[in-house]
Structure formats: C-alpha cells, structure tokens
Image (spheres, grey):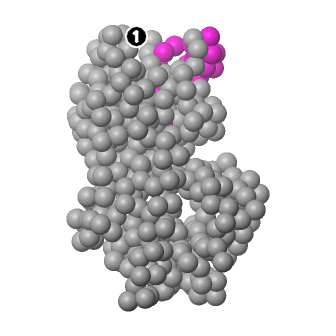
Amino acid sequence: MGLRIAVNTRLLIKNKLEGIGWFTYENLIRIVKHQPEVTFYFIFDRQPDPSFLFAENVKPVVLHPPARHPFLFIIWFEWSVKRYLKKLKPDLFFSPDGYLSLGSKIPDLTVMHDLNFEHFPADLPFWTRWYYRYFFPRFAQKVSRIATVSEFSKQDIVEQYEVAPDKVDVVYNGANERFSPLNEADQKVVRARYTAGQPYFLFVGSLHPRKNLARLFKAFDIFCRQYDSSIRLLVAGEKMWWTEPIRKAFEGMEHQSRVIFCGRLNSEELHRVTASALAITYVSYFEGFGIPIVEAFRCGVPVITANVTAMPEVAGDAALLVDPFDKKAIADAMQQMAMNPDLRKELVSRGFERAKLFSWDQAAQKLWQSMLKTISESNKMKLS
C-alpha cells in the first residue's frame, strides 16, 4: 500500500497566491506529479478551485470553518484538522505555512518561513501577533521536523525556539520560470503603460511595515532632490497594511507625483513589470528569503536590497546591499544604479549566475526528502 500524506492547502486560493501560497503551489504541483504512487489528501478550508487538484492521486477535503482569523485558526487546526487526521491516520501531515494541530499525534513536517513576528511584533495586529507568539514556539517543540527557506531562518528557529539544528532542513525558494528578460520593444510598451514611458525603480510585495516602504519613500525623495531626472518609483502590491507611518511618509513626500501604485499584479504582468525596471528596490528590514530578488536576477534586472537577515544570503555578490535603516544609503544606491550603466551590467551578469542556485525543481526535491525523512524517523520511533 502506498504512502498517504495529508497536506494543509488552505492558502491555495485562486488568483490570491501570496509568498507562502506560491511556495505551496510550486512545490506540491511537482511533488504530486513525481510521486504518483502516493495519495495526497489536500485539506482546504473552502471549496477548492479544480486547478489545484494537480493529479489523480490528489483527494480534496474541505473542513470548516474557513480559517482566516486567529480564533478560527485554533478551531480549524485543533478541532477540524485534528479530528480528520485521527480518522484518516495518514503517514504524514505536511503544513507548508508553519501552522499545526498541537493535539494531533500524526507525524508532521511544517515549513516555518521566518520569525519576523518574534523580532518585530508591533508590525502585526494584536490577535495575529498573540497567535504567532503563543503557538509557534509550541509548534516548534511538538513538530517531528521543520523545513525553512534559508540558513538565516534555520539559525533563527534554532536559537529562538531551542530546537536541535538537525531537526531543521533548509529548502531554498525558487522563482517562477516565466521570469526572463524582455526585449527593448516590449519594455517600452510596459513603461508606456505604467510610467508614461519613463524608467522606474520597482518595489514588489505586500505593503507591510517590514517591507520598509516608509524609508523607501523618503529615500526616493532624497534621490529625486539629488538627481533631478524623470525616473519613477513603481509600487506593485496590495495596500493591505497601509499603516500610519507608511501613509505619513508618502503624504510627506516632495516628489509624491513620481510614485505610481499599480496594485497587485498577476504573475504574467509582474514578470513584464519586473523585466522592464531600471532596478528593483527590495530593502525590507526582515526577510526569511526574498523571492523578488531571484525574480529580478532571472529577468536581467539589477537589485538593491538590504544587508540584513536572509537577503545577503540570497543576493550574494550580485546586488547592491544597503543598510535598510539608512535612507541616505538607499538613495545613494539608487543614484549609483541611475548613473552607472557599467555597474548595472556587471550586476545583471552576476545575477544570472546567482539565479541558477534557486529553482522550484530543487526545492521540491529537498522538500520531498524532508517528508521521507520525517516518515522514516517516525517509523523508527514506533519500532524502538
């Protein structure tokens, strides 16, 4: 009889895939197709879109209530999921978003992408913060194995939660294979659409405090004052977390008219917008990985990113690294990108090489090895 693996797929929502949703999608579509003898039970909290049932060996399960709030997280994982796992008795419960059922006795593997909530708790709403800081240390102690997306995050998990290093596997993110260079004619079309034909720096991501938008706006203002040009700042992402400091920074800008918000883009349009940028400005003050860095590398677009947390690990020597808390340093990096075509060319060349280190095929292979290791360790424990 083949293996049976239950999977938390509540973040697979049509047209609403964010970072962890993409990680879930890209890895599972590969693992499911490469392991046809394994039955995967995809556990959703609402009716799934058929496109997420990747092959014949996927069995969809819908458990209520929809888990979109900390109290509903508790009901869903500690009641609905726990009961279902007890009945199904799978070989493994895999949770790609870090959440688990503390009451379940099934061997489990979870992916903790980063612990930003431990370092910058004030960036999150009260109940979300409470949930993470109460449950995640307990998940880390209870879970059979943990996967994470960088050596930085592994070290952070080991230190914060006093977990044995050999319990944590590093599975680097990949980047969508659609991301590749665009020819000059197509770039002109994109610039005409978004920035009236002008070159632009690009920010990609949810407009969350840790993405450091407030300082990016201030840095761009400094850049505009120092280097009078037609360059714009294009912001691609939803205003989900449009906080007071971000709003104040934006409204206080002298060159506010040069900032363009294009909202959340689908992956095809995001590729076109990334590949047409002068450079991307990804200067978060906390990341567990930073997929837009790799996407830019694949597109042949130079990168300005932060010199903290996982970003130097991902960027290597292929980006300009800056102190994310120093507005002047960010502005200076923008100026270097704008004025030095040789630097841009050098970074693009290094970026293409760097991008080869990160692929979803490699990620799916490593994640599958983590799953097998978890099942094997659990079987050994049962026998001992």
Residue 47 at x, y percent in the picture: 74, 66
Residue 203 at x, y percent in the picture: 45, 33
**Which residue does the image show at 39% across and 28% down from the upper left?**
353
Q: Is residue 142 above or below residue 45?
A: below
**Which residue does the image show at 51% across and 82% down from the upper left?**
106
Residue occupied by mark 1 = 229
- Magenta region: 185-204
Question: Could you say which quadrant of the image residue 334 lies in?
Answer: top left
Task: Kindly tell me whether residue 352 is visible in this rendering.
Answer: yes
Most foreground residue, 362 or 280: 362
Most foreground residue, 270 or 348: 348
Mark 1: amino acid: Ser
**Which residue does the image show at 61% across and 38% down from the upper left?**
267
Q: Is residue 11 above or below residue 62?
A: above
Residue 77 at x, y percent in the picture: 54, 78
Residue 192 magenta: yes
**Which residue does the image show at 63% across and 16% down from the upper left?**
186
Residue 132 magenta: no
Quarter of the image where the C terminus is located: bottom left
Task: Kindly tell me whether residue 28 is visible in this rendering.
Answer: no
What is the crowding at mark 1: few (fewer than 14 residues within 10 Å), some, or many (at least 20)?
Answer: few
Q: Quick one: SS at disc 1?
A: loop
